[in-house]
Image: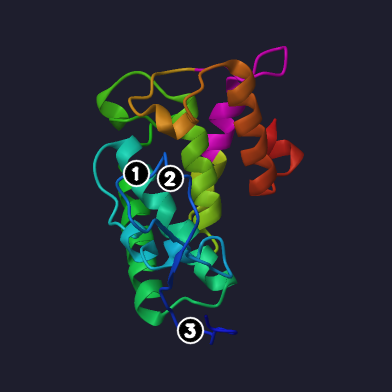
Amino acid sequence: MPSSAVKGIQFLMLFPCSCPTKSWRDLAEPLSLLSPSGDITGAVLQNLAELLQMPFGCGEQNVAKFVPNILVLHYLEKIKQVTPEIRQQALEHMQSGYQCQLLYKHDNGSYSAFGKHEDEDNTWLTAFVARAFGQARAYIYIDEQHVKDAVDWLGQNQLPSGCFQSVGKLFNNHLKGGVDDELSLTAYITASFLELHLDEKMSQ
C-alpha cells in the first residue's frame, strides 16, 4: 500500500475486506473499491468540459444551456484549472447564448419560452434570465438596460404583501427547482436582486 500520493498522479488500488459469509455466498474473495480525492468534486472535473454547450432552443432551453458555461468557467478560474481552450469555448457559448436569449424578450422587459410569439410573460424565466445576465457580465458584454428592463417588469408583479406574483408557465420545472409557490419565487427573485447589486430605485 503506498504511503503517499504524488500530486497529479492517479492510481487504483484493490484490497480484500471482511464481509459476512451469508451475505456473500457467491463471492470467494469480496472486494471493495475506494476512490480517494483531495477535492470532493475531483471526480467531476474530468467531465466539466461536457457542460460547456452551445445554447439553443426556446427561451427556457437556451438559458438552461447558457448558465452552465458561466458556472464552469467561474469554478475553473477559482481553482486555477481553466485552460485557454475552455475559456474561449465558454466565452463563445456565452456570447451566442446572450444574443439568442434576447430573441425571447418582450417589449415590456419580460421573457417567455417563445418570446413575442406568445402573449403570456413568465416571472420565473424573467428572473432566471436577469440573474444569468448578471453573472455573465463578468465575462462578456451585457447591456445593463436588458437587466434593468427585466427587473422593472418583475417589480410590477410585486404584490402588496411583498411577494411576487407568478405569471406564465414554465415547460421545464427544473428551472425553478420543482417548486411553484409565491414564497419560493419571492426568495429566488430577492436573491437575484441582491446578487445583481441593484440600488433601491431599480428594485422598486
**Does residue 145 show up magenta in the picture?**
no
Residue at numbered disc 3: 8
Foreground mark, 1 or 3? 1
Residue at numbered disc 1: 25
Element on which disc 3 rests: loop
Q: Look at the picture and state if 161 lies above or below 28.
A: above
**Magenta span covers which residues?**
149-166
**Does residue 150 show up magenta in the picture?**
yes
The residue at the point 66 percent across, 47 percent down is 195
In space, the residues marked 1 and 2 are separated at their CA atoms by 6 Å
Q: Look at the picture and state if 119 lies above or below 11.
A: above
Element on which disc 1 rests: loop
Left or right: 15 as drawn, with respect to 89: right
Residue 10 % position (x, y): 43, 79
Element on which disc 2 rests: loop
Q: What residue type is disc 2 on?
A: Thr
Residue at numbered disc 2: 21
Left or right: 150 as drawn, with respect to 112: right
In space, the residues marked 1 and 3 are separated at their CA atoms by 39 Å
